[in-house]
Amino acid sequence: MTELQPQQFQTGPLSSYQTIGEVTEAIHKRLLDCYDVTERPPRLEEDLKFVPKDREEVIYVYMYRAGMNPNLMNQKRLRLAPLEVTGANGEKEYFYHRPPLLMDLFYLVGVHAKFRSDAERLLGWVLLTLNSTPRLIYRPRRFILPTGEAVNSYGEPWDPKGDTWRAELQVEKVSLALVDDLTVGDAINLYTLHEAPYRPFLTYRARVALDGPLTSTEGGSGIAMGDHEEGLLPKDTHFPHQKKKPRSRVMGRPTSGRISKPPGPEAHNVRRRFDRKKPEDTEE
C-alpha cells in the first residue's frame, strides 16, 4: 500500500470562544426586551453584593458553574467539518475539526426590591418570561477559517440574523431550562462568599456546543482508522470474550460481517489500516 505523503496543516482561530459571554448577554437582552410591568425597567447586575440606595429593583444574573454535558460525547479525532467552501481556483476546500465541546452553563437569577412583596412580584415575572423562551440563541453556525474570515456552513459571510430556514444550513441553538441545581444551603454559602444578603433565587441551565479551530490541508489529509473499528473486521474473526452458556450456546446476537458501505456522509481521503505485513515464507 502506498503511504500518503505528509501535508502542511494550517490551523485557524477558535470558532466559539465567545459563545459563553454571548449566552449571558442574550439573557440580559431577553429580560430587558420583554419587561412591560412598570415604566422603569429593573437594573441588571452580575455583582451579587451590589445593593441599590433607592427603591430601584434589581435582577441579578450570575453564572456560577460550567460543566461538560456527557450526552452525545464523541471521539476527539479530527473529522471532516460540515462546511462547503470554494477556493479561488473553483475547487472545493476541505477543512477538519474535532467534535464540538458540549457544555452546560448554570445561572443563578436573583431579585432585589425595597419591599419583599415587590421582589416576589418581580421573581414571578422573571420565572414566566424565561419559561416562555423556547430558545435563547438561534442563528447560523459560525465557522472561522484559518484566514480569520467568519462564514456559515455554506461558506458565505456569517450573519447572525441570516436565513436560518434554508435547507441543510448548520444552525446553532442554545436552550434554557429551569433546574433545581442549588439547595438553600448552597445559595446561602454563595451569597455569603460574595458578602451579599440572601435573596430569592432561581437556577437555570443553558446548553451550548463550543467549536474549536478548523484545520485545512493542501489536497486533503489521510486519516488512518483503527483495526478494531466496528464492522471492519473479516467475517471469520474470532471473539474470545463472547459469552457462552454451559451447553455451548452463544448468548446475544451473532456478530455481523463487514459493512459494505459505512453509514454517514461520504468520507474524504480515508483509508483502512489493514497493512500488517505477513512473514515471508522461508525455505527449510
Image (cartoon, rainbow, N blue to C red):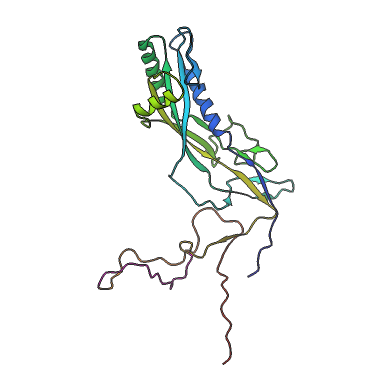
Q: Is residue 148 visible?
A: yes
Question: Relative to the observer, which residue lies in front, 202 or 197?
Answer: 197
Number of marks present in the image shown: 0
Residue 240 x, y percent position in the rendering: 38, 70
Q: Which residues are magenta?
A: 232-246
> Hey, which residue is sitting farthest right in the picture?
89
From the viewer's perspective, tell me whether residue 113 is left or right of residue 220.
left
The residue lying at 53 percent from left, 35 percent from top is 165
Residue 146 x, y percent position in the rendering: 68, 43
Question: Relative to the observer, which residue lies in front, 271 or 24?
Answer: 24
Q: Main secondary structure of the magenta part?
A: loop
Vertical arrangement, residue 243 with respect to residue 135, above or below: below
Residue 213 x, y percent position in the rendering: 61, 44
Question: Relative to the observer, which residue lies in front, 179 or 183?
Answer: 183
The residue lying at 56 percent from left, 66 percent from top is 273
Question: Relative to the observer, which residue lies in front, 239 or 80?
Answer: 239
From the viewer's perspective, tell me whether residue 6 is left or right of residue 109.
right
> Hey, which residue is sitting farthest bottom in the picture?
284
Quadrant position of the N terminus in the picture? bottom right
Vertical arrangement, residue 13 with respect to residue 42, above or below: below
Q: Is residue 132 visible?
A: no
Residue 281 x, y percent position in the rendering: 57, 85
From the viewer's perspective, tell me whether residue 175 is left or right of residue 12.
left
The residue lying at 46 percent from left, 33 percent from top is 65
Q: Quadrant of residue 195?
A: top left
Q: Is residue 243 magenta?
A: yes
The residue lying at 53 percent from left, 36 percent from top is 172
From the viewer's perspective, tell me whether residue 247 is left or right of residue 187.
left
Quadrant position of the C terminus in the picture? bottom right
Q: Is residue 16 magenta?
A: no
Vertical arrangement, residue 10 with respect to residue 224, above or below: above
